[in-house]
Image: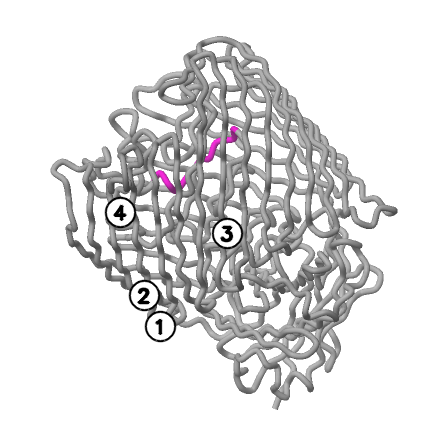
Amino acid sequence: MIRLARAAGIVLWTLPGIANAAAAQSPPVQPAVFTRDPSTGRATIQAVRLSAPLHIDGHLDETVYTTVPPISDFIQMEPRAGEAATEKTEVWVFFDQHAVYVAMRAWESRPDLMVANEMRRDSNNIRMGDCVGFSLDTFHDGRNAYQFEVNPLGARTDGQSANERQYNSDWNPVWDLAVGRFAGGWTVEAAIPFKSLRYRPGTSQVWGFNARRNNKWKNEISFLARVPAAYGIGRGSFAASLFPTLNGIDAPPRSRNIEVKPYVVADLTTDHTAAPAIVNHPDGDVGLDVKYGLTQSLTADLTYNTDFAQVEADEQQVNLTRFSLFFPEKREFFLENQGTFAFGASATTGASQPSGDTPLLFYSRRIGLNQIGNQGLAVPILAGGRLTGRAGRFSIGAIDIGTRDAPKAGAEATNFSVLRLRRDILRRSAVGVMATTRSAAQSGTGSNDAYGVDGTFAFFANLSLNTYWAKTRTPGLTGRDTSYRAQMEYAGDRYGLQLDRLVVGDAFNPEVGYVRRRNIRESFGQVRFSPRPNRIKSVRKFSGIGTYTYVEDSTGSLQTRTADGEFAIELQNSDRFSVGLLGDFERLAQPFAVTPAAKVPVGAYDFAIGRVGYTFGQQRPVSGNLLVERGAFYNGHRTSVGFSRTRVNLSPRFSLEPNVSINWIDLPDGSFATNLVGSRVTYTMTPLMFVSALVQYNSTTRHTSANVRLRWEYRPGSELFVVYNEERETLTQGFSDLQNGALIVKVNRLFRF
């Protein structure tokens, strides 16, 4: 027997863009499960309690699907914002004492045209085809949410969005999923255990819920809630303040909620560059990760003898600037709840890059990795802990972790500490503080400390203000040790404006953070005009963007000045064409080595570069971004060709993702080329088992590298990894000489209590 859960009461909703305006709306009257206010568009949903768990098989053949009406009436965000979706999508939300269930039925008028070519978990390619997604704002704070996404092949992504902007795709909870097909489309059934979620204390819950549908062959995006086109698919999925209210969920009483995940790893290592050389040296280790739910909304993570052998290698980059490169974090322990440690508007998640020259106060790759030259060397992590979650209107994040002595990596035993507090204010704004400490500073004796305050303020639908002030302390380092930023951004669909003022002192040195450039006073401005033509059916949007950057040092001397203009056409089939012209001024205070054999001398350089780009949509057999650039380069010239985010769909199971970056550079010292060629090759056996190989060649270092990984989630939350790494020198005649290599087998097992 199915019974409807008791209504959770009156729901208050603040209209987007109107401060302190509220509209009271009651939950749906039984047996209805969905209502939408015709005047505001605000929707409410009633969750339905099940008397028995659903059988997760993707068939939607249980009686409940005929007795409980579905939620439907999706609204387009693209291409015609505000109009009804052209393909029908139905949603059900159920729960019992163990889990929340979400089921969806996606009707298709042309099933033969669906685009689904990815089975691998957490692949960015899933969103590039037909898929459905749903979001849960379990704290009903209109800011943060859990994100789930599924395609017709059963591939899944899961992640966390924070403050309606940062996204962490490396949150991997335990949940069950199945997909199915029928003559008129495809179906999804998902079960998310309450143990995998964090939510407010208490049994009676009020959450936010939204659902999304991507219809790739029409290039149509629709949501259950009305989402402005200016938000785009990413921001639209994270816009928790727009989510319909989900009433009626009765959460189970708080349990111990303990997860224990031990691991064992064995490896065989060869290193011909070591002294003495190592050949097929066997080794092994064990370790442990523990997760404990202190409350329904606050979680402690403990780690001992942490190992990251299964992490994919970094994708190499060509660096034609005089500044250090940024590499994204890929280690699971640091990625989960990463958004909690966002500071100002400069934080990154996953593979994202920092915002230009804006420093990061916390950059987790400083922990367990030490940079020597262009090489990042691993430093063993002894043990550590992390506390993340919420307490009322406060977000809390704390990390304390220690590393061992690592003479070969040039690092001594060090303790790293990070504390982050953030308080929600107004409707979608927040203020916070952050502090970091490194017990052994890299630049001298004693510890390195950094601390700062920040604020993010959102007004109306598209206006935001972001600011921070931070200070560091490093023994033996003198100078201006502060940094601050003030940013204003208006991100409308038709118009965009961004103004930014950034200051980074010459002694600003957060050694648990990342600084691309010091001793700068940077002013930045960008304007955008993006009209949507009604009479050109093949074009979705035109876009004209103008950007101006002016950077001087503390004495007022001009260091960098760039003026960049771009015109782009976004087509209805998801292709994109762009042309641009960049004018650049650079002042070099010391010679800049483009390569070890070619240097640009001290001086002031004024040059211009033109570019043409074309993006081939994911529905094509071969997709990716093609970019061609030609122009001056300091005291010479440069021509470059790049093909990135490329994908060749050989079958739903087998794909190639080649990347090519070639630069032909002419300087007074001589002419040379830099070639970076690589590809990720992936074969997916099931949505929970795949093997991938990342193979790369860099002409600058004359090395080839390979990272081959087998990942099998043999039971929910438990995994087997088999990894092979090698690096070869290509300067020798005949077959490349092996420099180093390793074969690694790692198994972990999740126990939940």
Q: Which mark is residue 381?
A: 4
In the image, which is nearer the foreground, mark 1 or mark 4?
4
Marks 2/3: CA–CA distance: 22 Å
- The answer to the question of whether label 3 and label 4 lie on touching residues, with beta carbons closer than 8 A, is no
In-image side of 256 versus 44 (left or right): left
Q: Disc 1 marks which amino acid?
A: Phe
Residue sitting nearer the eye, 598 or 338: 598
**Would residue 417 be counted in the magenta stretch?**
no
Marks 1/3: CA–CA distance: 26 Å
In the image, which is nearer the foreground, mark 2 or mark 3?
3
Q: Secondary structure at mark 4?
A: strand
Marks 4/2: CA–CA distance: 18 Å
Q: Secondary structure at mark 2?
A: strand
Marks 3/4: CA–CA distance: 23 Å
Q: Earlier in the sequence, mark 1 or mark 4?
A: 4
Please name the residue that numbered disc 3 is placed on.
Answer: 168
Quadrant (top left, top right, bottom left, bottom right) of the N terminus: bottom right
Please name the residue that numbered disc 2 is placed on.
Answer: 260
Specify start and end residues of the magenta stretch as a single range. 357-366
Mark 1, residues whose alpha carbon is within 10 Å: few (<14), some, or many (≥20)? few
Q: Disc 2 marks which amino acid?
A: Val
Please name the residue that numbered disc 1 is placed on.
Answer: 753
- The answer to the question of whether label 4 and label 2 lie on touching residues, with beta carbons closer than 8 A, is no
Percent across and percent down for residue 118 are 53, 61
In the image, which is nearer the foreground, mark 1 or mark 2?
2
